[in-house]
Image: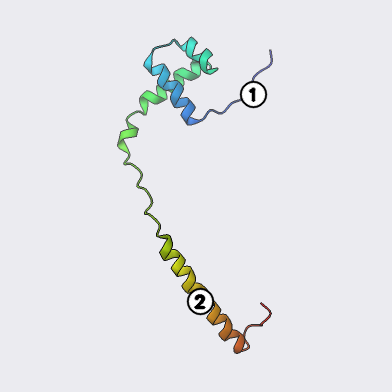
Amino acid sequence: MARRPRRNHSPEFKAKVALEAAKGEQTLAELAKRFDVHPNQITAWKVQLVERMGEVFDKPAKEAAPPVDVKSLHAKIGELTLANDFLEGALTKAGLLSAKR
């Protein structure tokens, strides 16, 4: 019998399977067949879930990034563009920058 290639499961999938196992509504064999995972793997994920369950409430929620004011950013881009154009013109007149740019 050929061996199946190694699979990497997403954390979401592992959590889903471990939670189903923790509920205890189905046997490990039933869950293994349903999710196509070895029963020992389900047991390992369940143990990890139970051991690390408290960490969910220990960490503070991630703060959302402050909202970006697009109008002020566009205004700043305009200011910088004007300054660059002015300096380019001044440097070109002074002969420090070629007019070919």
Q: Give x and y (percent) for residue 52.
A: 37, 29
- Residue 82: give its label: 2
The N terminus lies in quadrant: top right
Q: Looking at the image, is 63 positioned above or below residue 40?
A: below
The C terminus lies in quadrant: bottom right
Q: Give x and y (percent) for residue 7.
A: 59, 26
Secondary structure beneath dot 2 equals helix
Q: Quadrant of residue 50?
A: top left
Seen from the viewer's position, the closer of residues 55 and 16 is 16
Identity, as a three-letter code, of the amino acid under mark 1 = Pro
Task: Tell me the CA gap for discs 2 and 1.
Answer: 59 Å
Q: Give x and y (percent) for residue 23.
A: 37, 16
Q: Residue furthest bottom?
A: 94
Residue in the picture at 41% in, 25% down = 48
Q: Looking at the image, is 9 positioned above or below residue 101?
A: above
Q: Looking at the image, is 96 positioned above or below residue 55?
A: below
Residue in the picture at 46% in, 12% down = 28
Secondary structure beneath dot 1 equals loop
Q: Residues within 10 Å of mark 2 (few under 14, many from 20)?
A: few
Q: Looking at the image, is 91 positioned above or below residue 23?
A: below
Badge 1 is on which residue? 5
Give the left or right position of residue 22, taking residue 84 as reference.
left
Evaluate if marks 2 and 1 touch, with contact meaning CB atoms under 8 Å apart: no
Q: How is the image coloured?
A: rainbow
Residue in the picture at 40% in, 57% down = 68
Q: Residue furthest front?
A: 71
Identity, as a three-letter code, of the amino acid under mark 2 = Leu
Residue in the picture at 63% in, 83% down = 97
Q: Quadrant of residue 51?
A: top left
- N-terminal of the pair, mark 2 or mark 1, is 1
Marks 2 and 1: which is nearer the front?
2
Q: Give x and y (percent) for residue 53.
A: 35, 28
